[in-house]
Amino acid sequence: MLAYIAFRRALISDNLPEFTCLVGTMVQEVYATAPAIRDACGASIFGHAATLEANFDAAIRQYRVVGLTAQSLARHTQTVIQGAFVLAKAANNPALAREGLDHLERYVRLIFNRQSEPTPDA
């Protein structure tokens, strides 16, 4: 899980179109006017979240975390990533996307009692 977050953070470049999500942008624009596109975007985003569930489930069982499911944590991860992209675009500042993923890493470490700080930029 932490490696996935680090990987997504490493993909963030100074060029917004290189790392932001076309599907996330499209669904924001057409959710009410183009249901077929909205549904396709949803399938893409939720499908990607589903690829994280097995790792989240293993960690939840290993660390005996209660009160959340692998599915909800995977969706939350996508929520943070997509939100980080939106804020980066709104401010024209990729550092805001990195900041969002740093907070996501802190949250994951907190719920799994794996205290450590995110690795700072080199």
Image: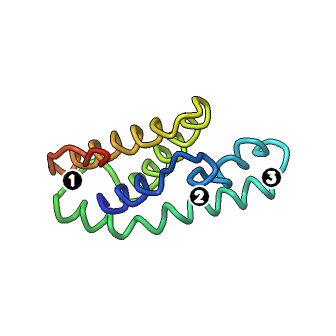
Marks 3/2: CA distance?
15 Å
Foreground mark, 1 or 2, reads: 2
Front position in the image: 5 or 95? 95
Query: Which residue type does callout 1 highlight?
Result: Val
Residue located beneath label 2 in the image: 45
* The disc label shown at residue 65, or none: 1
Query: Which residue type does callout 3 highlight?
Result: Pro
Closer to the N terminus: mark 1 or mark 3? 3
Foreground mark, 3 or 2, reads: 2
Query: Which residue type does callout 2 highlight?
Result: Ile
Mark 2: which secondary structure?
Answer: helix
Marks 1/2: CA distance?
25 Å
Residue located beneath label 3 in the image: 35
Quarter of the image that includes the N terminus: bottom left
* Residue positioned 28% across, 49% down in the render: 108
**Residue 94 appears left or right of 2:** right
Front position in the image: 26 or 31? 26
Query: How many residues crowd mark 1 within 10 Å: few (<14), some (14–19), many (20+)?
Result: some
Front position in the image: 69 or 44? 44
* Residue positioned 31% across, 65% down in the render: 57
